[in-house]
Amino acid sequence: MAKQIGLVTVFTGNGKGKTTSALGCALRAVGYGKTVCVIQFMKGTWHYGELDSVKRLAPELEMIQAGKGFYRILDDKYPKEVHEKAAAEGAALALEKVKSGDYAMVVLDEINVVVREGLLPLARVHEIIDARAPEVHVILTGRNAHPSVVQRADLVTEMVEVKHPYQKGVLAQKGLDY
């Protein structure tokens, strides 16, 4: 069997499905007996169905909510400094995970948004990508992926919103959207 080559994947764009795509890759990897770590950089205060699913797939799938929730939207009540500290701690954890050799895949959920909002320096993301063990897949999600991250990636998919139920006043649906 050929040796695993770690790839960098980016799921970005304004359309829905970035995290869902990354979790699909994680689910596939676990199905093959691989270990996966998902670090969520923005989804830290709400309850999501995937948190319960992950418990069923442990220890092969580990999910860590490193963020303090959404930044400057919805129910955000934290100052920027709190979000910056959480992003820095999440990035330190991500660096540790990609270097450890313990994971076949590390998902950095919403890290593109963290960079775009100025909560984490772009150089830190480059450091994480560059430090990964050669066989580790790294998936970065979130809108507005920085061009240099796109350049470094092996695979980039941009989600494009064509139609969304929210445009008709339909809110997010439990079990489908969260």
Image (cartoon, rainbow, N blue to C red):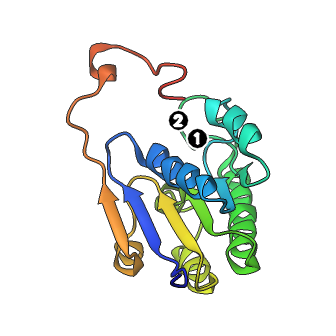
Which SS class for mark 1? loop
Tag 2 residue? 73
* Disc 1: CA contacts within 10 A as few (<14), some (14-19) or many (>=20): many
Left or right: where 94 falls relative to 17: right
Residue 156 against residue 177 in the figure, above or below: below
Extreme residue toward the top, this view: 169
Percent x, y of residue 68: 70, 44
Q: Is residue 65 visible?
A: no
Q: Is residue 150 visible?
A: yes
Give the residue at x 54% y 23%.
175
Give the residue at x 60% y 82%.
127
Left or right: where 138 falls relative to 168: right
Give the residue at x 20% y 36%.
162
Extreme residue toward the left, this view: 162
Q: Amino acid at mark 1?
A: Phe
Percent x, y of residue 161: 25, 39
Towards the viewer: 112 or 23:
23
Query: Which of the 4 quarters of the picture holds residue 91?
Result: bottom right
Where residue 42 is drawn, which disc sits there?
none
Percent x, y of residue 117: 50, 57
Q: Amino acid at mark 2?
A: Ile
Query: Which of the 4 quarters of the picture holds residue 167?
Result: top left
Residue 32 against residue 14 in the figure, above or below: below
Towards the viewer: 69 or 60:
60
Left or right: where 56 falls relative to 140: right
Tag 1 residue? 70
The answer to the question of whether label 2 and label 1 lie on touching residues, with beta carbons closer than 8 A, is: yes
* Disc 2: CA contacts within 10 A as few (<14), some (14-19) or many (>=20): few
Residue 143 against residue 102 in the figure, above or below: above
Percent x, y of residue 144: 37, 58
